[in-house]
């Protein structure tokens, strides 16, 4: 019996490889996005702690007047300002990572669609192959039946001529 051989098997294999690679790149982009979000969360946490420290320190130092107090508060204010800048930069980083995820997702979906097209062609070809096998089997069956009928007629004729 003949074995099914898909005419576009090499294309299908290539598209499967591309789909797996696109999926790997998508996962990598998603990890990058999660890391950027975690970094931003850490920056917000540090900012919150710095603001609380500044408020507590300013309340305690309000009782003590002096130049060193204003210098310390200035340094804390500089840290808070710097932290806000870093948070803004982290937000831009998150936007970049989101764009990477969106691009990787589009590429993955495209490769998935291309693979699905090839799989559909494979299914059609396989159905056509099975249909041809059924036709061939039916033809063989018909020929076998015809041969059996012919043999039976010949045997009947020979049997009748032997008796007569």
Image: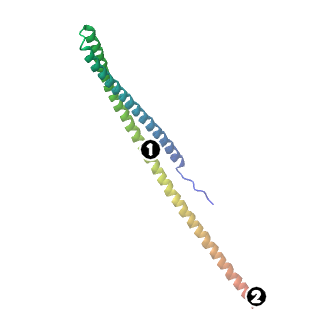
Find disc 2 in the rendering and name its residue. Answer: 162
The circle drawn on residue 161 is: none
As drawn, the residue found furthest toward the right would be: 162
Residue in the image at 53% along x and 45% along y = 13
Task: Nearest to the eye among marks 1 and 2: give it.
Answer: 1
Q: Position of residue 129 (x, y in %)?
A: 54, 60
Q: Nearer the viewer, residue 64 or 162?
A: 64
Q: Left or right of 152: which side holds 80? A: left
Residue in the image at 57% along x and 54% along y = 5
Q: Position of residue 38 (x, y in %)?
A: 39, 30
The circle drawn on residue 111 is: 1
Disc 1 to disc 2, C-alpha distance: 75 Å
| Residue 4 position by quadrant | bottom right
In the rendered view, tell whether residue 7 sits above or below residue 104: below
Q: Position of residue 27 (x, y in %)?
A: 45, 37
Secondary structure beneath dot 2 equals helix
| Residue 62 position by quadrant | top left
Q: Are marks 1 and 2 in contact (CB under 8 Å)?
A: no
Q: Nearer the viewer, residue 146 or 60?
A: 60
Q: Nearer the viewer, residue 13 or 145?
A: 13
Q: Position of residue 109 (x, y in %)?
A: 41, 44
Q: Disc 1 or 2, which lies upstream in sequence?
A: 1
Q: Left or right of 106: which side holds 158? A: right
């Amino acid at each position: 019996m003949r074995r099914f051989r898909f005419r576009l098997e090499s294309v299908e294999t290539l598209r499967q490889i591309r789909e797996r690679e696109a999926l790997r790149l998508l996962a990598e982009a998603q990890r990058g996005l999660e890391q950027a979000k975690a970094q931003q969360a850490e920056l917000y946490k540090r900012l919150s702690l710095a603001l609380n420290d500044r408020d507590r320190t300013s309340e305690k130092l309000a009782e003590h007047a002096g130049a060193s107090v204003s210098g310390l508060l200035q340094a804390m204010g500089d840290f808070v300002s710097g932290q806000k800048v870093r948070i803004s930069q982290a937000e831009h980083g998150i936007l970049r990572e989101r764009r990477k995820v969106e691009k990787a997702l589009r590429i993955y979906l495209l490769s998935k669609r291309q693979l699905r097209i090839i799989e559909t062609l494979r299914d059609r070809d396989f159905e056509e192959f099975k249909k041809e096998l059924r036709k061939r089997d039916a033809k063989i069956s018909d020929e076998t039946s015809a041969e059996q009928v012919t043999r039976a007629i010949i045997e009947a004729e020979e049997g009748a001529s032997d008796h007569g």
